[in-house]
């Protein structure tokens, strides 16, 4: 256990279970726990189980803490689910199956998963359940475009210490040098297939055998034009339309930046309030010292100089945790925008002569 985790290996069947569960509950977040074993600094995940669904009680429209989304997000820390997970692991051990707690999984939409609930769930697993645990994040919307998005995260040791001590004030962050990049550690994730399944995949023919209808000649020229040849040239790859997910991600990025400015304005307001109160305290202390000097000259007992603690109340400093999480979420959105625009940028440069006047004459 002294060797830090370096990679995560997930069985293909576990990947299919996670994808199926997340797709069925979308857009409501899906959560579950994963089991496996730790082997040579590689966390092998061999099975996954969804948490039982809890029916949300009716609300009055003002208090929505028990919405299905909130219940699903906090499911890993619910007492009933903790008992369910312990009972499931006990039964797996009875049949001699890998039953070590290796973490949990959750679904997300457009990469929006870095929030306080996610941090609390992962902290709960790394602190109480098992230190060598990971959080598997499956982006349903990104995977729907044909590119599987499955990532593994852990909380960094420095952030675990700060979160345990609740030291997220400006002075504490400066001493610990904790940045928003230090919140999560992403581990490389590999999908593993059994040898039997790999042999079966290699035994499959590359192409289906042609039928008699395909071997016969087309009767007319019109039917020949309707034959779809996968190797024939097409213009699909030259499509310049912008990915709709790029637009949605950009909107989410702008919302996160506005939230960051709001948090910054709140902290600046606290600094102004603190400066005003400190100026009042300094003026009061100066006045009290002059009064005590006069009383000493008049051979009178001096007045206490620590009464300012009772007369003045300093404003409470707001925590910087939400600012750190929002900054990390902004970075996540920026990386997604970079990935979305990578394919479109090359096409734009290729056809810029037709888009910009005078650009083709260079």
Image (cartoon, grey):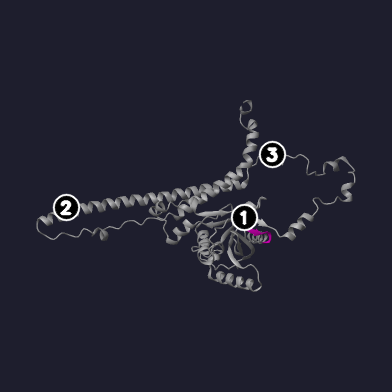
Q: Earlier along the polypeptide chain: callout 1 or callout 2?
A: 1
Give yes or no for contact between labels 3 and 2 (Cβ–Cβ under 8 Å). Answer: no
In the rendered image, the residue lying farthest to the left is 298
Residue at (19%, 55%) from the top-left corner? 288
Res. 213 visible in picture:
yes
Residue where numbered disc 3 is placed: 238
Is residue 46 or residue 217 the one in the foreground? Answer: 46
Residue at (26%, 53%) from the top-left corner? 281
Q: Earlier along the polypeptide chain: callout 1 or callout 3?
A: 1
In the rendered image, the residue lying farthest to the top is 361
- Label placed on residue 189: 1
Residue where numbered disc 2 is placed: 290
Judge whether residue 12 is colored magenta.
Answer: yes
Bounds of the magenta span?
Answer: 7-13
Vertically, is 169 above or below 50? Answer: above
Judge whether residue 206 is colored magenta.
Answer: no
């Amino acid at each position: 256990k002294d060797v830090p985790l370096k990679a995560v290996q997930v069985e293909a069947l576990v990947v299919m279970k996670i994808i199926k569960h997340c797709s069925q509950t979308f857009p409501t977040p899906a959560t579950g726990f994963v089991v496996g074993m730790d082997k040579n600094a590689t966390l092998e995940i061999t099975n996954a189980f969804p948490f039982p669904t809890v029916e949300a009680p009716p609300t009055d429209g003002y208090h929505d803490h028990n919405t299905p989304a909130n219940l699903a997000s906090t499911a890993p820390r619910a007492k009933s689910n903790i008992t369910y997970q312990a009972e499931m692991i006990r039964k797996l051990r009875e049949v001699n199956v890998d039953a070590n707690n290796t973490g949990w999984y959750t679904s997300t939409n457009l990469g929006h998963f870095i929030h306080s609930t996610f941090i609390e769930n992962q902290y709960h697993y790394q602190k109480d359940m098992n230190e060598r645990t990971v959080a598997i994040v499956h982006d349903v919307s990104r995977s729907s475009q044909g590119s599987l998005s499955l990532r593994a995260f852990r909380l960094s040791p420095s952030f675990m210490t700060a979160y345990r001590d609740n030291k997220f004030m400006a002075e504490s962050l400066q001493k610990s040098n904790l940045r928003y990049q230090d919140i999560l550690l992403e581990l490389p994730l590999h999908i593993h297939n059994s040898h039997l399944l790999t042999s079966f995949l290699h035994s499959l023919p590359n192409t289906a055998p042609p039928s008699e209808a395909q071997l016969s000649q087309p009767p007319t020229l019109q039917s020949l034009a309707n034959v779809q040849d996968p190797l024939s040239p097409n213009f699909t790859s030259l499509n310049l339309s912008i990915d709709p997910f790029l637009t949605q991600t950009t909107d989410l990025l702008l919302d996160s930046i506005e939230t960051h400015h709001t948090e910054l304005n709140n902290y600046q307001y606290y600094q102004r309030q603190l400066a005003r109160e400190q100026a009042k305290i300094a003026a009061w202390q100066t006045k009290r010292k002059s009064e005590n000097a006069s009383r000493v000259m008049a051979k009178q007992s001096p007045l206490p100089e620590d009464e300012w603690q009772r007369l003045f109340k300093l404003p409470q400093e707001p925590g910087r945790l939400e600012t750190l999480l929002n900054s990390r979420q902004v970075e996540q959105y920026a990386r997604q925008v970079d990935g979305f625009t990578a394919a479109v940028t090359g096409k734009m440069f290729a056809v810029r002569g037709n888009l910009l006047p005078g650009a083709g004459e260079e």
